[in-house]
Amino acid sequence: MRRLAPTLVMALALAGCNVSGQTPRHHKAKAPDASGRKLIVVDASGVPLGKLRLRKDRIRVYGPDMMPFGMIAQDESGLGFTPNGQTTPQYLTVDDHGIWESAESLRIEPVDRGWAVFGAEAALIGYVEFSGTWTFRSGYDDRPQWVTKGRQVMAGAEKVCTGLSADAEQEMTLALCIVGLPLESRALLGAWLKAQDIAAAAGAN
């Protein structure tokens, strides 16, 4: 199992256009929220599950209808989700036992093999683990139900969902596929898993 990072790291790479000088003629300038690396996750039928704009300092979250849903950002209080139109974040906080929780709608608990993920009313959603690739299983002793392969989440030979992005955002794609959680919890879970992966990679160097 990978060790939990003492602090979350929102080290998501910058992407998108950096335009300097004058805007060329007939070129429509991008809106501020259109910058960053785009990720759209669709299910096996191509139906969108959500969209993210990944930037170094925040993640913009959009619903399946591609309308703004909220924002994930890291500040001095931790990693939090702010619903669209509101100003107060719902933070993912950690207790003395290394258990992370947000507004009783998401709990991430370390286990011998990865992390147990719980939803509202402490309902077990499943287990997430990294063992060369990201996996999801329903029960602790079960074989992996889903495995990430490139930009796709697979159940055996069947495609579960796909992350449409220039880069393979495996943690975020896997998290957005877990429809047993509300969208804000899925986005928070993905950002948290990404931070653990980055911290573990940095510790190995």
Image (spheres, rainbow, N blue to C red):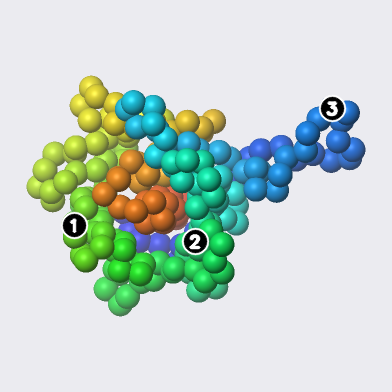
Q: Alpha-carbon distance for marks 1 and 2?
A: 24 Å
First in residue order: circle 3 vs circle 2: 3
The kind of residue on which mark 1 rests is: Leu
Element marked by disc 2: strand
The mark closer to the camera, 1 or 2, is 2
Q: Alpha-carbon distance for marks 1 and 3?
A: 53 Å
Which residue is the extreme one toward the top?
Answer: 157
Depth check: give the residue in front, 199 or 147. Answer: 147
Q: Is residue 34 left or right of residue 78?
A: right
Q: Which residue is mark 3?
A: 26
- Examine the image and state in which quarter residue 107 appears: bottom left
Q: Residue at x 57, y 55 (%)?
A: 58
Q: Which residue is mark 1?
A: 124
Residue 52 visible in the snapshot:
no
Q: Residue at x 49, y 68 (%)?
A: 89
The reply to whether the C-beta atoms of the residues labelled 3 and 2 are less than 8 Å apart is no
